[in-house]
Image: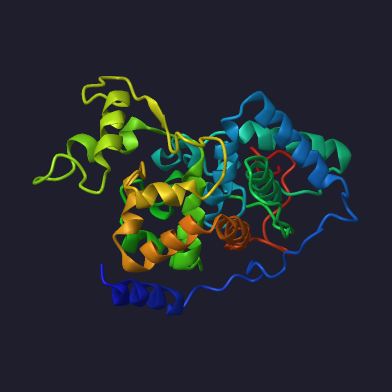
Amino acid sequence: MAVITILSIIWMVLSAPVAARSEGDGHNLHVNYYKNTCPQAENIINKAVTEAINSDLGVAAALVRMLFHDCFVNGCDASILLDENPSREPVEMTSRANIGVRGLEVIYEAKARLENECPETVSCADIVAFVSRDASVASGLNYYYVPAGRHDGLVSQAKDSIENLPKSSSNVSYMAKMFAQKGLSLHDMVTLLGAHSIGVAHCSTFDKRLYNFSQDQTMDPQLNQLFAFTLKLACPEVMKDRNPLVHLDHITPTTLDNFYYVRLLAGKGLLYSDQVLMEDPQTREIVEQMAFDTDMWNREFGKAMVRMGRIDVLTGQEGEIRRDCRFVNK
């Protein structure tokens, strides 16, 4: 897609009138929010995260991406954690868009400890933000400060996840429009996709690139051929009820680093939505910058996470502080 086209999409989305929320513009959040009301809050959360990762190294990737799955669906309000709605509608976690999301028990454990320390004080939405930060740092990212003060939402609907979360088959223009709708730039998008530097993906999320890419091509021409061969070994075409897991980055699978971008330059991005960043001149330029400057990506990722953590937050009289992250207060 031409550069001017993507720029136009983002400009139109950001310029469009948006229904105002009385409090939740993200500017009411601040660092050390619990300094007086629950001074040990961040330490308690960090301890829960550290224990979980020590027990299961793979959970770190899920916790890093938890903020994205929460914030992109009606704002950073911990709606992804709800087990039920007052309306009895299916909740976000039942949506196919959230298949593979895990680590919720880490947040529940942190919340239980916080309720013992300072009851009805720390929101589940803030815990999600702190947990994502702590998991990022545990995976190699530089420490960054997280502004807090979010309240928890009262509604969680599966259908909202489908509408607001990009798919592994999404192209650049679609993702750019979706990120712009959340107030995030193209630079933010490419930076945040670097979270795919760790974790795993099911074969079903990318096997079309290997066996059934288009009417004219069996395999995605963007794929490095040797890399494609190794993927075919891991993901046979006839899998029946099997759906194996493959590392997003098999070189440094548990370390958050800029090798994600190096692999894109070599045609070794696992997901189509990752490798397609090389097709657009704007996103390709950002990929190249991140690939050749490790410190730049490390800095920018923390900043982008903070910006994402401000999406449509609830503060003031909006929402509530849940006593149990799985249920709205009675």
Q: Position of residue 247 (x, y in %)?
A: 44, 33
Q: Quadrant of residue 81?
A: top right
Count of picture labels: 0
Q: Position of residue 112 (x, y in %)?
A: 77, 34
| Render colour scheme | rainbow
**Residue 188, relative to residue 57: is it above or below?**
below
Q: Residue at x 55, y 38 (%)?
A: 61
Relative depth, front residue between 283 and 10? 283
Query: In the image as oriented, which residue stretches furthest toward the left?
Result: 216
Residue 293 in view in this figure: yes
Q: Quadrant of residue 60?
A: top right
Q: Residue at x 74, y 59 (%)?
A: 149
Residue 86 in view in this figure: no
Quadrant, the N terminus: bottom left
Q: Position of residue 168 (x, y in %)?
A: 35, 46
Q: Residue at x 78, y 48 (%)?
A: 122
Relative depth, front residue between 261 and 121? 261
Query: In the image as oriented, which residue stretches furthest toward the front?
Result: 292
Q: Residue at x 33, y 37 (%)?
A: 205
**Residue 138, relative to residue 319: is it above or below?**
above
Q: Is residue 287 left or right of residue 313?
A: left
**Residue 268, relative to residue 307: is it above or below?**
above
Q: Position of residue 74 (x, y in %)?
A: 52, 57
Quadrant, the C terminus: top right
**Residue 196, relative to residue 211: is it above or below?**
below
